[in-house]
Each structure stands twice: as structure tokens, then as C-alpha cells.
Image (cartoon, helix red, strand yellow):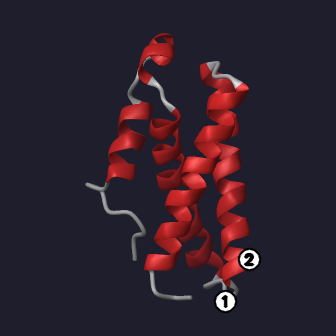
Amino acid sequence: MGWFNDDSQEARHYNEFQNTDPREHEAKFSHELIGGAAAFEAMKAYEDHEARNGQIDNHARAKEVVAGLIGAFVDREVETKGLDFVDREKAKHHAQQRAERQLEESGRW
């Protein structure tokens, strides 16, 4: 099915984020970059979850699942890359907006 295709902005952010040297994070990482990467990663994990467990019928529940996946990705990356609280919260918010828009555009709710 694929939520974000491989040439989407989210996929590009994910690849850039994964390939950036951690020592360069202050100059290169922004909440938009991390948020895009988080949205991409969360939607991949959500797609895997649906493949194993079936489609979630409730839109609010789907948003909760995606929010949890986003939070896990952002928190892990903040801890390993040494980002601050403000960047973490902005990244989560940015990722949530992108992922929710993708859920809405899927036409399933």
C-alpha cells in the first residue's frame, strides 16, 4: 500500500536524517527534518502493524497509534543525537501533522 512513496519529502528527510553524521547535528538537524523522518518511519511501522493485525477501523485510534510510533522514534533519536526538549516537541508536532494529513488523504476515514 505505501503511505509515503520513496521520493516523498518525508522519505528524503528520513534518508538525510539517517545519513547525517551525529557530530553535525546542530548545524543540520531541524525539527522539520526530524519530523519528516519521524512521520515516514511511523507510517512504515503503522503499515507493518496493519499488515500483521488488520486495518484499524477507528480514525481516532489510528491517530493514537501513529502518535505513539512518532514519539518512540523522536525520543530515541533525541537521546542518541543529543537534541534538546524544544526540538523534540517541535519534531513530534511536525511529524504528527504530516502523518495525520497522510491518514486523511488515504480516504479510509
Type of amino acid under label 1: Asp
Residue 57, label in figure: 1
Q: Residues within 10 Å of mark 1 (few under 14, many from 20)?
A: few
**Image quarter of the N terminus:** bottom left
Residue 105, label in figure: none
Horizontal and vertical percent for residue 13? 38, 41
- Can you see residue 29? yes
Q: Residue at x 66, y 82 (%)?
A: 59
* Circles 2 and 1: CB atoms closer than 8 Å: yes
Type of amino acid under label 2: Arg
Q: Is residue 27 above or below residue 16?
A: above
Q: Residues within 10 Å of mark 2 (few under 14, many from 20)?
A: few
Horizontal and vertical percent for residue 46? 58, 66
- Can you see residue 22? no
Between 49 and 75, the residue placed more toward the observer is 75
Horizontal and vertical percent for residue 26? 50, 15
Q: Is residue 5 above or below residue 58?
A: above
Horizontal and vertical percent for residue 55? 61, 85
Query: Which image quadrant is residue 100 in?
Result: bottom right
Q: Tag 1's secondary structure?
A: loop
* Residue named by callout 2: 61
Q: Residue at x 43, y 33 (%)?
A: 17
